[in-house]
């Protein structure tokens, strides 16, 4: 088999989902990810780790080597390696293997391996749910478009909590638990977000009145980001196309996109 034919075959197995070999590879990959994440979780339990520490280390390195080979192969068979490396999945694939190697230099870095759970997003491709992945891209685009408005909104909320927290400090004072402005601001944030831990509460009539206003204000504030994102979603839906990548099957590219976000292949427009 020639080098180009071998490269094409590996590409079909790794990125393709329409062939038996491609489906088997993706399912095996998901199982490996699940098991590796489970090992990291169990390893954090001291009683279990003390008993099976050596076995966990062996399993962890086996999976790391497997994922490293897979990552290198993806770069090798992709026509535009840079696009894959800096794509969402490419970054996640890299982050899923680097913690084990960092553990040689940084103690406890292997705990970061739980990031491998993000690779489970590949289940969208395995189960032919690419249209849902496309919808998630719509939402991501809307959030990016809304970020400035949301940042301004968050800044306004933070300023409000500072003012309200300071006011509560002046009304209640240290004798009722509001012993500092930062502590009072913490209370204002907890109350405004309707979390209400109950570790500190007002005792005076003025304090209760202000707390009531903050609670009511909290319900209104929750609705604002939702409205901002919804508005941008409406605009984004007009910018996202239903173009399907002929290689990996990803749907939901930007209307002006020339290459696939998943595998870097050039999109074919009909």
Image (tube, rainbow, N blue to C red):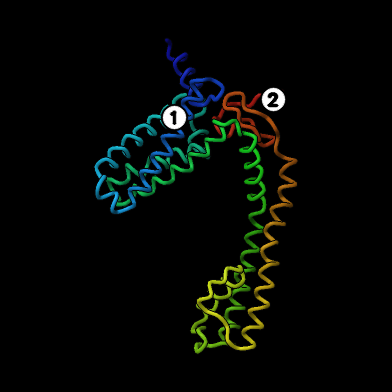
Is any part of residue 202 visible from this angle?
Answer: yes
Mark 2, other Cα within 10 Å: few <14 / some 14–19 / many ≥20: few
Mark 1, other Cα within 10 Å: few <14 / some 14–19 / many ≥20: few
Query: Residue at the location (58% across, 34% down)?
Result: 261
Query: Residue at the location (48% across, 30% down)?
Result: 27
Between the C-alphas of marks 2 and 1, the distance is 32 Å
Quarter of the image where the C terminus is located? top right
Side of 111 where 216 appears, left or right: right
The one nearer the camera, 98 or 197, is 197
Question: Is 119 placed above or below 161 here?
Answer: above
Element under disc 2:
loop
The one nearer the camera, 49 or 264, is 49
Residue 33 coordinates in the image, percent (x, y) = 43, 37
Query: Residue at the location (29% across, 54% down)?
Result: 46
Q: Nearer the viewer, mark 2 or mark 1?
A: 1
- Label 2 or label 1, whichever comes before in sequence order: 1
Marker disc for residue 28: 1
Query: In which image quadrant can residue 1 be found?
Result: top left
Residue 19 coordinates in the image, percent (x, y) = 53, 20
The residue that mark 2 highlights is: 269
Element under disc 1:
helix
Q: Residue furthest top?
A: 1
């Amino acid at each position: 088999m020639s080098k180009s034919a071998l490269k094409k075959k590996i590409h079909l197995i790794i990125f393709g989902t329409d062939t038996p070999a491609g489906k088997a590879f993706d399912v095996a990959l998901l199982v490996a990810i699940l098991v590796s994440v489970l090992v990291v979780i169990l390893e954090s339990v001291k009683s279990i780790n003390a008993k099976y520490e050596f076995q966990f280390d062996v399993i962890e390195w086996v999976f790391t080597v497997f994922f490293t080979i897979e990552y290198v192969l993806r770069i090798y068979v992709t026509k535009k390696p840079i696009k894959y490396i800096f794509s969402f999945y490419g970054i996640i694939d890299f982050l899923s293997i680097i913690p084990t190697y960092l553990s040689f230099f940084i103690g406890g870095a292997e705990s970061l391996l739980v990031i491998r759970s993000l690779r489970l997003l590949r289940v969208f491709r395995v189960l032919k749910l690419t249209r849902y992945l496309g919808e998630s891209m719509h939402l991501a685009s809307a959030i990016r478009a809304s970020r400035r408005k949301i940042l301004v909104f968050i800044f306004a909320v933070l300023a409000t909590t500072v003012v309200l927290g300071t006011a509560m400090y002046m009304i209640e004072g240290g004798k009722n638990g509001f012993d500092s402005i930062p502590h009072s601001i913490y209370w204002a944030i907890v109350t405004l977000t309707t979390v209400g831990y109950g570790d500190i509460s007002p005792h005076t009539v003025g304090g209760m009145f202000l707390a009531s206003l903050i609670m009511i204000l909290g319900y209104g504030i929750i609705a604002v980001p939702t409205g901002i994102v919804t508005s941008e979603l409406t605009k984004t839906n007009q910018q996202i196309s239903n173009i399907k990548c002929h290689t990996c099957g990803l749907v939901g590219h930007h209307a002006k996109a020339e290459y696939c976000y998943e595998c870097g292949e050039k999109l074919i427009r009909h």
